[in-house]
Amino acid sequence: MKKLIAISVVFALVAGAAFAVDVGATVIGTVNVLQGDTGYDKDADESTKVRGSGGMNRVRIDGSGEANENFGGYFRGDAGGGLTGNVWWKPVEQLKLQIGGNGGDGFIGKEGVTGWGFYQTATDSGVAMGGDNVWGGSIYGYGLKTRYAFYEQGDGQEDLYLFITPMDMLGINIILPFISHKGEEAADIFKQTIAQIDVKMEGVGNIALTYVGGRGKFDGKDYVAGTDPDDYKKATVFTDANGDKYYLGAGGAPVAITGDAGKAPYDEPASIFLYYGGSFGDLSIDFGLGYHMATHDKGDDGSTHNLPIGIGLGVKYAMETLGVKFRTVVALPMDSECDGMKILADVMPYFVISDNMTAFVSVGLGMKQPYKDQVDDAGEKVKSVTGWHFNPYLQVGEEWGAKFLFGIKAWSDGEKKYGKEGDATQVNWAIPIALHVSF
């Protein structure tokens, strides 16, 4: 009997070890004690009010484990955001096949300090300026982000991944978007493949070349509902002011479409990203070049729109008691009749006050120039605009554990449109605090 009990205990321990899962959780709560702006509420005929707000920025649980050395998985659950995860198989050491994602953090991003790594965990609390300059349209609404020059977009998606490592210094990474683009034609899915060559050389740095596929251009000419599938009637589909679809029939008369009018027009060019990252003692450097292929129509003559080239730079200098981070990205126009130059630049010195207290001071500018002969709705020539932000904050606690954050945020897009007569710029401001606990 004792032997049976002992065997059962050993079996339970072995099974538990074989199927063990490492589980963690993160909870972030943020309150804007005060917030407001210098704008004018025209409806109320008065200055805008000072307000407050708050919420739970994150309630997350995640875990990972291995069934054995060849199979494993990961899961993540976010309150209000649902579940995500991935499963993987390594038939040989040089190949890992994976299905699924990790909630958007990605696997093969190449951006270094210019992305999430600029503010790090303070990004998620909202006390720092956050990810607007990285994955949004910039703090200032200029439509530029650092990821225009550095690859990251899409690599957190739930899809089929192939990680091929023929040698330690070389990685070949492929993403086939069967899940994120499910239901599309097979040819379109393969056109949107992401492929990366990733080379890491000791003493030199990391060089990566990433191709992000696009479906190309489709002008919306497709079948009209009600026609024989074997003999589709080709037509350009239009949409009137009421949102109803139609095409031009005999004599140019509009013919209403009440059913499916086929695929909508799209224009999705491919992109290529070149990255270099290197560390040299206290100094690290990230350089990115983003080339976005020209497939956009510029006019009825079929001419193409040569999209701007993205050029980015990130620098981090870190010592024991102080450091500084810098990042910038430029959208360099290749077509002066469609695009003006846009620039984002952020610098953030930080100071280690004690073992569990660090002060940060983030300052940034955004600049937007008009393109050639650009005019506004009133026919006036568009002028250059400069936005800015100022964001000092204090972190008490651990970067990757529990902490309290307090900050001051002020920013402006530089546009003169927020005054009583539409002739003033607006300064937005907030005083946020946050509690961030990971365990």
Image: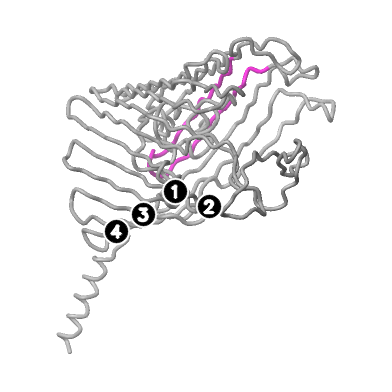
- Identify the amino acid type marked 1: Gly
Asked whether the viewer can see residue 333, the reply is no
Residue, disc 3? 99
Residue, disc 1? 103
Lateral position of residue 322 relative to residue 434, left or right:
left
Q: CA distance from mark 2 to mark 3?
A: 19 Å
Q: For residue 168, what is the image quadrant? A: top left
Asked if marks 1 and 2 touch (Cβ < 8 Å), the reply is: yes
Q: For residue 248, what is the image quadrant? A: top right
Residue, disc 4? 72
Magenta-colored span: 386-415
Tag nearer the camera, 3 or 1 = 3
Q: What secondary structure is marked by label 4?
A: strand
Residue, disc 2? 81
- Identify the amino acid type marked 2: Gly
> 264 or 131, which is in the foreground?
264
